[in-house]
Amino acid sequence: MNESIGKRVLILLHCALIPSILFVLGLCAIILPKPTFSEYERRDLETFPEFTAASLRSGAFTAQIDRFYADTFPLRESFVQLNASLAEKRGIQYNDMILYETGNGTLGDNGPSTTPIQSSVPPSASLQPPQSSQPVAPEGPAGPPAPVTDDSPDGDETGSSSAPASSGQSSQGESSQSQSSAPPPSSSASSSQTPPAADGGTGADINAPAPETYNSILIYQNMAMAPFGGTKTASEYYASVLNNYHEVLGDSVKIYNLIVPTSIEFYLPDQYKSVTNPQKPNIDYIYSLLSPEISKVDAYSAIQQHTDEYLYFATDHHWTALGAYYAYIAFAKEAGFEPKPLDSMEKRTISPFIGTMYNQTQSSKLLENPDYVDYYITDTQHQAYQFPRNSPYHGNPVSVWAEFAKGGNAYSVFLYGDQPLTRIDTEHKNGRKIMVVKESFGNAFAPYLIPHYEQVFVVDQRYFQINGLKFIQDNGINEILFINNIFAANTSSQIRCIERILTQSDWYFETRPASSSSESSSQESPEGEGNEAEKTEKQKEDEKDNSSGTGSSSQKVTVKKRE
C-alpha cells in the first residue's frame, strides 16, 4: 500500500516537473532584463517591435515578436554555445580533412567589412557643392567618436573568388567567399608572440591535425583561412581598369598597384594546398597585363620573407599592421623614399580581438584563441579629416586612429573603418599628393604614408561619392596607389567600383521649401535635378542663407545624385 502511494507521488512529481520548469523559464523571460547583443555570436539581438496596424495586418509584428523571444529567452547564450560545441563534434572524415556545415549557406554572401566609425560631430555640409571638389574641413575639434554600424555593398571585398576546381568546386569568379586571416597569436596581448614555425614556407606543422572547413573557411591550428580561386577573366578586367586610369590621366599622375596576398598562401601545409589555388601566379598574371608605366609593388616577396611573424589575424580576414608595414617597405622602393623604421613609431595595442572569421564559423577554437591589434603612431605632424557618406565636401577633424575601437570592431582603429574619404594633411610641403584607392586592407597601410606626403587622400572604392577625374585634378593629386587584397582584385563587383570612380557623378545637396516639395519635384528637369542653370534667384539666395547657417527652418534638405 505504502509502495503504491509512493509511486503515485513520484508520478505526480514527474508530471509537475516539466510544467514547472516551463513556467519558471516563461516567468524569467518576462521579468528578466533582455540582452541586446550576443557576445558569442557577435551580433545585435532582435528588439521588441513597435506596434502599428499595418505591421499587424501584414504579420510582420508577430513575426518580429517571435524573433525577439527566440533571441532573448533565458540562458540562450549558453544553449547557443553548447550547440556550437556539439556541432564541432560532427563531420565526415575525408582525406584527413573534416567538413562542417555552418547552416548559413555560402559564407561571405554579404561580405565581411570593417564597420565604419564616425565622429559624433555632424558634418557641417553646405547645401550645394563647391565649384571645385576640394574637400573643405570645418573648423573646431571633433567630439567624442561613436561607432556606427554599416552594411557593405557591392559584394565581398575578400571573396568572390571561388575555390579551385580541384577541391570539388567549379572555379567561378562570382561566387562569394570570405577571405582569411593568419597565424594564431597567443591570447596574450604581447606582440612578441609569433606564429608556429613555417615548414617550407607554409608556416604550419605538417604533423598537426587536419584542417576543418566551414563551407569556404578552413580552420587549421586555430587559424581561419579561406580558399582562393581567382579567374583569368577577373584578372584581365582588373588590369584593364587600371590601364584605363593611366590612359585617361597620362603621365601627370604616377600610378602604383599593390595586390595583397592572404594568409592561406603562406600558412596552409603543402598536403592541403589542393583546396586552394596559388596566389602568386594570379598576381604575376595581373602585373604582366599592366601598362609598363604603372609601377607594380611586390608586396608578396616582402611578406614571404617574414612569415614567422604576426602578419595576419587568426580570427579575422585582414592582415595586421605588421603585415601592412612590410608591404609599405616594398611600396617605398617603387615610390622612391626611405621607409620609416618601425621602432621609430610608438606601438599601441588593443586586446582581445575576435574578428570576421569567427563571426562566420562560430568556432570555439577561434573564440578561445583571440587576436590582438597593434597599431603604430607616427611622429609626423598631421591633421586628418573624415568625410562620411552623403557629406563628400565637408569633413570632421579626427585622429587617424580610432583608439576607442575594441572587441570585434578593433580593426576599425585604422581610419575609423571604411570611410568614403579620409584626407590627411601633413607638415611636409614637398608637393607630393597621393590618392589611395582601397578596400579595408588599405586601412592598416595608409597611415604609413603620412611621413612622406604633403597630403594623403584615402578613398574607399565602394563608397566614394565624387567624380574621380575632377577630384584628382582639383586637388592636384599626382600619385595614385591601388591597394587590394587578391580576393578583391578577382571580384568583379569590387573592380566595377574602381572603374566607376573615374566617371561617376558627384553627389550634391538640394534645398527647397518643405511646403512645396511635391510641386518642386514635378517641375524638375529630366536631365538633372537641381541644375544650377535652372535655379531661380530665390532658390540660390535660399541656399546661400542655409550654407552660412542662417537658413529658415522651413527649408527641407535632401541629398540627391546628379545624373
Image (cartoon, grey):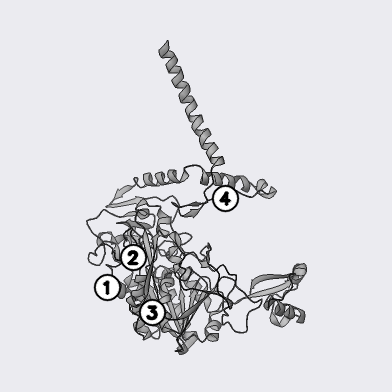
Q: Which amino acid lies under the numbered mark 3 shown in the image of this protein?
A: Leu
Q: Is residue 109 left or right of residue 276?
A: right
Q: Residue at x 41, y 82 (%)?
A: 451
Crowdedness near tag 3: few (<14), some (14–19) or many (≥20) residues, C-alpha within 10 Å: some
Position of residue 71 measured from the top left corner of the image (x, y, whole percent) = 51, 47
Q: Earlier in the sequence, mark 1 or mark 4?
A: 4
The one nearer the camera, 37 or 464, is: 37
Identify the mark at residue 47; answer none if there is no mark: 4
Which quarter of the rendering shows the C terminus? bottom right
Q: Which amino acid lies under the numbered mark 2 shown in the image of this protein?
A: Ser
Q: Earlier in the sequence, mark 4 or mark 3?
A: 4
The one nearer the camera, 470 or 239, is: 470
What is the CA distance from the residue labelled 2 to the residue labelled 3?
Answer: 25 Å
Position of residue 252 measured from the top left corner of the image (x, y, whole percent) = 47, 89
Crowdedness near tag 1: few (<14), some (14–19) or many (≥20) residues, C-alpha within 10 Å: few
Q: Earlier in the sequence, mark 2 or mark 3?
A: 2
Q: Which amino acid lies under the numbered mark 1 shown in the image of this protein?
A: Gln
Residue identified by numbered label 1: 305
Is disc 4 in contact with disc 2, using a CB cutoff of under 8 Å?
no
Q: Nearer the viewer, mark 1 or mark 3?
A: 1
Residue identified by numbered label 2: 263
Residue identified by numbered label 3: 289
What is the CA distance from the residue labelled 1 to the residue labelled 4?
Answer: 49 Å
Q: Is residue 462 above or below residue 74?
A: below
Q: Earlier in the sequence, mark 4 or mark 2?
A: 4
